[in-house]
Image (cartoon, rainbow, N blue to C red):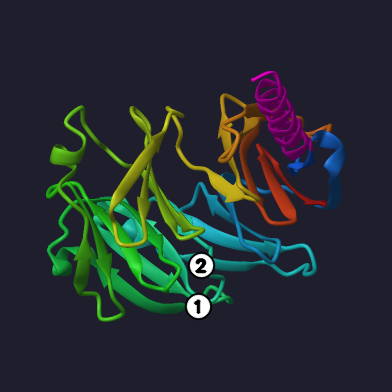
Amino acid sequence: MRNLTAINYSSSIIRLFSCSMLFFLLPSFTGHDFTLIKELTNVQGTKVFSDKFGCAYVATSKNALTKLCADSSRPKNYAMMRFGKITYADVSNPLKILVFYKDFATIVILDNTLSEQGLIDLRKTNILQPGAICLSLDNNIWVYDELEYRLKKLNTDNQVYRQSEDFTILFPEGARPNFMLETENQLFVNDPEHGIRVFDVFGAYSKTIPIKGLERFQIVRNQLFYFQNGQLFSYHLKTFDTKPVALPSTSQTHLLDVNIQEGTMVCLYENALLLYAFK
């Protein structure tokens, strides 16, 4: 019995040591990881999005979308005044950019030059009140239908071919998604009041991440990054550890938005856009 106890104790120590080593080996982000690669002044924006190639997309106060890349001095612009304010731009696939105008239940599809390739009037698919949209990994489109309380997936013919269970049954406490992101074979659906609901790629509910009050977030290297109250935070999806991320010092003031993708970070200030690289 004494030997068995010793063996169990040793095994516990080994597991604890292994977990500790795993924690310290996980990728981390601090202010020292970032290197400024480009600073653009006189940028008037309200939101910023970024793609995997290090390009930034700024939604301006004039309802336009401007694309700015570190390796180019010539910005590209897109403007569609009749749909009003841009709610969200999904740039996860730079060759198929989705610009969402919630008030008009409309999605505009752009290519990498911000040239218009198509337009989806969601009302024609019987989604009269979309709450959030995102591009799926198979290049189809997820939409949350606020009137039917379901996630709906549209194919390339703009037909609904998959949908989730009724959210009023899944979440009797309430649901009002405002942002969605599909990555790592999971669909992350943000509800500011109740947290981030996680689904599989077929629309089946899995779990809820208890982070509330968010507008948007990004997921990089098993870490969920979100900008809240002027501070950038990371939440590790494996260890559930939340940490503030120290941003590089700058003379710019009034940080409005931050977006992180693999290898790049974009910071939108009141009058400037800063692009960083990180290892």
- Amino acid type assigned to the residue bearing label 1 in the image: Ser
Is residue 112 highlighted in magenta? no
Left or right of 170, for residue 87: right
- Tell me, for residue 115, which label it has, or none: 1
- Amino acid type assigned to the residue bearing label 2 in the image: Tyr
Give residue 236's quadrant in the image. Answer: top right
Q: Nearer the viewer, residue 271 or 88?
A: 88
Q: CA distance from mark 2 to mark 1?
A: 7 Å
Tell me where residue 46 appears, x and y as whole percent: 54, 43
For the point 16% across and 68% down, which residue is it?
125
User: Is the magenta region chiefly helix, strand or loop?
Assistant: helix
What segment carries the magenta color? 1-24
Q: Quadrant of the N terminus?
A: top right
For the point 65% across and 37% down, which residue is it?
270
Is residue 13 highlighted in magenta? yes
Q: Residues within 10 Å of mark 2 (few under 14, many from 20)?
A: some
Q: Is residue 146 above or below residue 23?
A: below
The residue at which mark 2 appears reads as 78
Q: Nearer the viewer, residue 221 or 11?
A: 11
For the point 51% across and 67% down, which residue is it?
78
Q: Is residue 265 above or below residue 78?
A: above
